[in-house]
């Protein structure tokens, strides 16, 4: 089955609901302007509540090395996710597997991007919205994704229970990533929407 990451978790009970619904990973946002931002102390409480075998992903946008290292000292996420203009050397410098997010629009060469970030575990493809690094809840034209990319694809941007099965059937990503599509309010997940999203993923049959 297609893997699922649920991002923007701010509460332990939401993390548990995601785990019990069958999510493979949760995302913790360490980007202060985001409405889904968590402090390291908050993130530790969330991570401590998780059952075994759920991957924790720490999300950053153009951080300093010291900011990433401060999180790694306290929490040690399993994967780092970079949503800004971080160069490959920076992303790889922490000794932790990483995902590189790309905001997709016409003219972005995803094959070249994948080659540049070839040390990444995968590319997370999100919608391009001017001035916003992610979490917009908007989809992009999935036809812009090349059929063959040299890195696994994590599909993000505007996914929700109603469209995730169609997205998976069209794009055939390694994983999907959802945040606003399963929320009751920004940073607060809706357990029923999470369960419906997971059912949508399963119904895709891929």
Image (cartoon, rainbow, N blue to C red):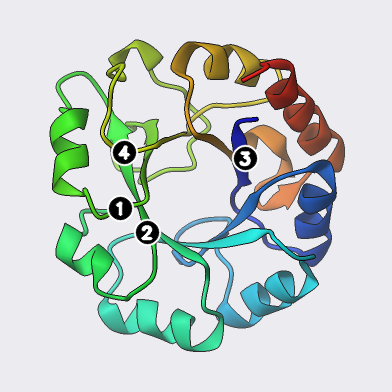
Task: Using a 10 Å C-alpha cutoff, classify the residue at mark 3 as few (fewer than 14 neighbours), some (14 to 19) or many (20 or more).
Answer: many
Real-space Cα separation, disc 2 to disc 1, in angstroms: 5 Å
Q: Which mark is residue 151?
A: 4
* Residue at 73% in and 24% down: 202
Q: In the rendering, at what x and y percent does residue 140 appear? A: 39, 20
Mark 1–mark 4 contact, CB under 8 Å?
yes
Choose the circle earlier in sequence order: 2 or 4: 2
Choose top left, top right, bottom left or bottom right for residue 12: bottom right
Q: Which mark is residue 159?
A: none
Task: Using a 10 Å C-alpha cutoff, classify the residue at mark 4 as few (fewer than 14 neighbours), some (14 to 19) or many (20 or more).
Answer: many
Q: Which mark is residue 120?
A: 1
Real-space Cα separation, disc 2 to disc 4, in angstroms: 12 Å
Dot 4: element: loop
Q: Mark 2 = which residue?
A: 98
Q: Mark 3 = which residue?
A: 4
Mark 2–mark 1 contact, CB under 8 Å?
yes
Mark 2–mark 3 contact, CB under 8 Å?
no
- Note whether residue 51 is visible: yes
Disc 2 vs disc 4: which is toward the camera?
A: 4
Choose top left, top right, bottom left or bottom right for residue 85: bottom left
Dot 1: element: loop
In the displayed structure image, the side of residue 132 where residue 115 appears, left or right: left
- Note whether residue 87 is visible: no
Real-space Cα separation, disc 3 to disc 1, in angstroms: 18 Å
């Amino acid at each position: 089955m297609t893997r699922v990451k649920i991002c923007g978790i701010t509460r332990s009970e939401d993390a548990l609901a995601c785990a019990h619904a069958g999510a493979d990973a949760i995302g913790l946002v360490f980007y202060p302007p985001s409405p889904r931002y968590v402090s390291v102390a908050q993130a530790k409480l969330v991570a401590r509540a998780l059952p075994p075998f759920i991957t924790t992903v720490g999300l950053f946008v153009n951080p300093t090395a010291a900011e990433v290292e401060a999180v790694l000292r306290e929490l040690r996420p399993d994967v780092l996710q970079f949503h800004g203009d971080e160069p490959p050397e920076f992303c790889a410098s922490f000794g932790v597997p990483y995902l590189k997010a790309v905001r997709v629009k016409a003219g972005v060469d995803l094959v070249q991007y994948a080659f540049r970030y070839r040390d990444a575990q995968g590319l997370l493809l999100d919608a391009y919205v001017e001035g916003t690094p992610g979490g917009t809840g908007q989809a992009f034209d999935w036809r812009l994704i090349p059929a063959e990319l040299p890195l696994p694809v994590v599909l993000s941007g505007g996914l929700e229970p109603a469209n995730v099965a169609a997205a998976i059937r069209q794009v055939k990503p390694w994983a999907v990533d959802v945040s606003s599509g399963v929320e009751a309010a920004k940073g607060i997940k809706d357990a029923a929407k999470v369960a419906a999203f997971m059912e949508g993923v399963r119904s895709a049959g891929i």
